[in-house]
Image: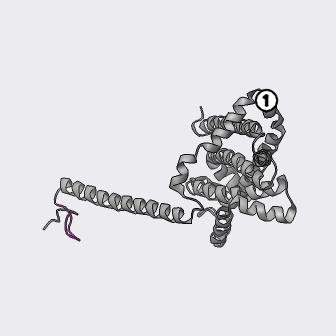
């Protein structure tokens, strides 16, 4: 007998294609409903836990959510004539932030490219090291940049170097996984041809794999650069230098300096928009060739 809700009995196939289609449709709806219930329950339980541990009352505080932004923008509007000069004054700190992001992205991408070739199945030089290298990149990816930066600031002192190292390590973990997944889809025939004529492992990678994966690798690296600009700005709040540090100082002063807060925010926002547009254009050209 056919089950009305879930299809045929276990071990029996539907008699017709229409019955098979209805069986698959009911199964997908069942799984979709269960996932939806799980998602809603997770959201509700997470909100209740956060509400219980919140220092104040979240629901009562919602009505005051716009108080601080309105105070900041009201003062900045009153002093709007100062904004161009303050924005120009923030440019040196912005350049430091972009330099941190650029250097950390370059270092992280180069290390990730090398590790990805060593931990990709089918092309790895030492296959037994694949699980070890994958766990290393997992560890780099699991540690937030701010945690690494705080440890390095304690050891090395504040400045741009701890931020660069922290972001480079996290970038290595993130791009290492992405690069390895791209390399797994590479065609192995060029590698086999190079191996048959006596090419070394490095030559096989350079001439057989990298030309295939380079566009996607560069696309992911550009995307990561956008993320790292934001990360380097955030790390400024913990003393890692850059425009984030200037924003922290301006906010600590409170009223009277809110025009500087808005100016720094505008500079950072415009920079991220420009980088985002340039990166989008670059990735499009790399992937589509247009």
Give me the residue at 62% from left, 61% from top.
Answer: 123
Q: From the viewer's perspective, is residue 232 above or below residue 280?
A: below
Residue 198: in sight, yes or no?
Answer: no
The answer to if 11 sits in the magenta stretch is yes
Prevailing secondary structure class for the magenta stretch in the rendered image: loop
Range of magenta residues? 6-15
Relative placement, left or right, of 117 versus 85 is left
In the image, 94 versus 246, the foreground residue is: 246
Find residue 42 and report its image quarter: bottom left
SS under mark 1: helix
Q: Quadrant of the N terminus?
A: bottom left
Whole-percent x, y for residue 41 in the image: 41, 63
Report the residue marked by disc 1: 82
* 178 in magenta: no
Q: Nearer the viewer, residue 246 or 114?
A: 246
Quarter of the figure that contains the C terminus: top right
């Amino acid at each position: 007998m056919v089950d009305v809700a879930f299809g045929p009995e276990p071990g029996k196939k539907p008699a017709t294609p229409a019955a098979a289609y209805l069986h698959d449709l009911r199964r997908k709806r069942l799984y979709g409903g269960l996932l939806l219930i799980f998602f809603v329950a997770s959201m509700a339980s997470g909100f209740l836990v956060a509400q219980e541990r919140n220092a104040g009352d979240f629901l009562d505080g919602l009505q005051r959510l716009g108080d601080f932004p309105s105070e900041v923008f009201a003062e900045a509007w009153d002093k709007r004539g100062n904004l161009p000069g303050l924005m120009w004054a923030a440019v040196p700190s912005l350049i430091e932030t972009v330099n941190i992001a650029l250097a950390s992205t370059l270092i992280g991408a180069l290390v990730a490219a090398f590790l990805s070739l060593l931990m990709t199945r089918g092309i790895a030089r030492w296959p037994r090291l694949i699980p070890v290298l994958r766990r290393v990149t997992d560890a780099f990816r699991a540690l937030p940049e701010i945690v690494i930066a705080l440890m390095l600031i304690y050891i090395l002192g504040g400045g741009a170097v701890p931020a660069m190292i922290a972001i480079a390590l996290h970038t290595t973990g993130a791009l290492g996984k992405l690069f390895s997944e791209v390399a797994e889809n590479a065609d192995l025939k060029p590698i086999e041809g190079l191996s048959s004529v006596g090419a070394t492992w490095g030559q096989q990678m350079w001439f057989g794999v990298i030309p295939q994966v380079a566009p996607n690798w560069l696309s992911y690296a550009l995307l990561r650069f956008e993320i790292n600009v934001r990360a380097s700005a955030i790390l400024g709040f913990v003393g890692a230098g850059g425009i984030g540090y200037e924003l922290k100082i301006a906010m600590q002063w409170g009223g009277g300096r809110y025009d500087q807060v808005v100016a720094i925010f505008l500079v950072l926002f415009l920079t991220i928009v420009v980088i985002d547009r340039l990166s989008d254009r670059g990735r499009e050209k790399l992937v589509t060739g247009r």
